[in-house]
Amino acid sequence: MVTMTENAATAIRTLTDQPNIPAGAGLRMAPADSGSLGLSLAPAAMEGDAVVESSGALLFLDPEAAAVLGDKTIDAETTPDGQLNFTVVE
């Protein structure tokens, strides 16, 4: 199953700990139109999603995303210009 680093968990909590985001929300990974995996904030997991929880952060994986990611790790970093990037680590 996919895991996430503490950096990724912190980034997801930062995104979901907003007044306009409902409790139990998380970051959802699913196939995008471009053929890559897309990220979006989701109020809850969708039916069939795998749910990964780490340090209070929730990551929802579409079944196809879960299969593609396998046993990989999700990491996050903030670039010098303030952009948040999520990466997949082997």
Image: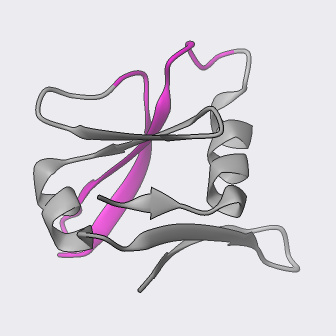
Indicate the quadrant containing the N terminus: top left, top right, bottom left or bottom right. bottom left
Residue 48, above or below 22: below
Foreground residue among 42 and 7: 7
Where residue 42 sits in the image (x, y, percent)? 41, 31
Residue 30, above or below 73: above
Where residue 39 sits in the image (x, y, percent)? 41, 55
Residue at the spot x=49%, y=25% of the render? 25
Quarter residue 14 falls in: top right
> Is 29 within the magenta?
yes
Q: Is residue 13 visible?
A: yes
Q: Is residue 85 visible?
A: no
Q: How many marks?
A: 0
Where residue 69 sits in the image (x, y, percent)? 27, 70
Decide if residue 25 is on the left or right side of residue 66: right
Decide if residue 66 is on the left or right side of residue 59: left
Decide if residue 44 is on the left or right side of residue 5: left
Indicate the quadrant containing the C terminus: top left, top right, bottom left or bottom right. bottom left
Magenta highlight range? 20-44
Foreground residue among 80 and 9: 9
Residue 64, above or below 13: below
Residue at the spot x=36%, y=22% of the render? 44
Quarter residue 50 falls in: top left
The residue furthest right is: 80
> Is 59 within the magenta?
no
Where residue 6 sits in the image (x, y, percent)? 69, 57
Residue at the spot x=18%, y=66% of the render? 33
Residue 88, above or below 82: below
Residue at the spot x=42%, y=22% of the render? 43
